[in-house]
Amino acid sequence: MSNLRQRFYIENCPVRGEVVQLTDTLHTILKQRDYPQAVEVLLGEMLSATALLASTLKIKGNISLQIQAQGSFKWAMAECNHLGQLRALADFEEDARFGQASDSSTLFSTLQQPILFINIDPEFGERYQGIIALDQPTLAGCLMQYYALSAQIPTHIALASDAQAAGGLLIQLLPRTEEEKEHIDEDLWPRLIMLTNTLKADELKQLDAQEILYRLYNEEDVRLPEVEQLEFSCTCSQQKCENALIHIGEDAVKDTLSAQNPIEMDCQFCNAKYTFNAEEALALFGRHLS
Ligand SMILES: [Zn+2]
């Protein structure tokens, strides 16, 4: 079982990358709901992608990808924070087209009026939301196009997933210093892309990160810092539920109590249950049961 992110550098080159692998973390997330295969594959790719993208951020906080659509597929979201904690969820109606899939293109082809958002929520500072055009066949293709248009950092991304394992690889050509520009190897980036494209989806899902990097780039001088662990973790809490009740207000809470006492709040991501009896709910507003 491996749930990890391996950063890599290529010595003397302005290139860095990441390999992500998810096994039992993926199983834990997928078993929260009864997902058809195309949705499992999409969520696996989205989880791998957020784990890759989180590593490119230099801030503490959270990065999420979110797809919204009309039609039988409603929405999906996956997120990863700076601690490598992941969660994901999707909502959909039954549709025979969701039965089988080898990559995200199956589900993408069924989406009606889809929008793909990328959200960055720093612990401190302003939230960023960008819209990623969904006009490529796969999630990896859409993300690469987004980087090409918005970030101006040449970025190559590969994603693969099934119900058992998900994997991702990201490689970036970083801005070069004046000295690096003098000794430029113009061939480097096209060569790395060509090598990366030889990686098969099954290899990305099944091989060790180090094995993948060795197979792809054994002609290059690849450096590996310490591997980072990834895990499933939900950010729901008693406090957040209390805040939500306070937010809807005393009258709405009283209305809810008259229909449902105690109030039950279920977290869709992890199936945790939070309950508030009338006394507890009213105490949030400084009231007592009369
Ligand atoms: Zn939760």
Image: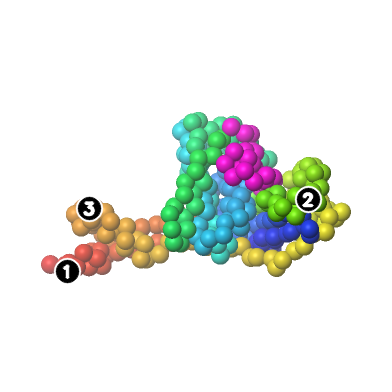
Residue on which the image places disc 3: 252
Q: How is the image coloured?
A: rainbow
Q: Residue at x 35, y 66 (%)?
A: 239
- Asked whether 161 falls inside the magenta stretch, the response is yes
The numbered mark, 2 or 1, whose residue comes first in the sequence reads 2
- Asked whether 119 falls inside the magenta stretch, the response is no
Q: In this view of the protein, which residue sits in the foreground, 277 or 107?
A: 107
Label 1 – label 3 distance at C-alpha: 16 Å
Q: Residue at x 70, y 61 (%)?
A: 6
Q: Residue at x 47, y 39 (%)?
A: 68
Q: Position of residue 172 (x, y in %)?
A: 69, 50
Is the CB–ligand 1 distance for label 2 below 8 Å?
Answer: no
Q: Judge from the rendering whether residue 3 lies leftward or rightward of residue 82; answer left or right.
A: right
Q: Are marks 1 and 3 in contact (CB under 8 Å)?
A: no
Classify mark 3: residues with Cα within 10 Å, few (<14), some (14-19) or many (20+): few
Which of the 4 image quadrants contains residue 99? top right
Tell me the quadrant of the picture where the C terminus can be found. Answer: bottom left
Q: In this view of the protein, which residue sits in the foreground, 290 or 5?
A: 5
The numbered mark, 1 or 3, whose residue comes first in the sequence reads 3
Q: Secondary structure at mark 1?
A: loop
The amino acid type, in three-letter code, at marker 2 is Glu
Q: Position of residue 129 (x, y in %)?
A: 47, 46
The numbered mark, 3 or 2, whose residue comes first in the sequence reads 2
Residue on which the image places disc 1: 288
Q: Position of residue 136 (x, y in %)?
A: 62, 34
The circle on residue 182 is 2
The circle on residue 26 is none
Q: Judge from the rendering whether residue 246 lies leftward or rightward of residue 41; answer left or right.
A: left
Is the CB–ligand 1 distance for label 1 below 8 Å?
Answer: no
Q: Judge from the rendering whether residue 132 lies leftward or rightward of residue 15; answer left or right.
A: left
The amino acid type, in three-letter code, at marker 3 is Ala
Q: Which residues are magenta?
A: 135-162
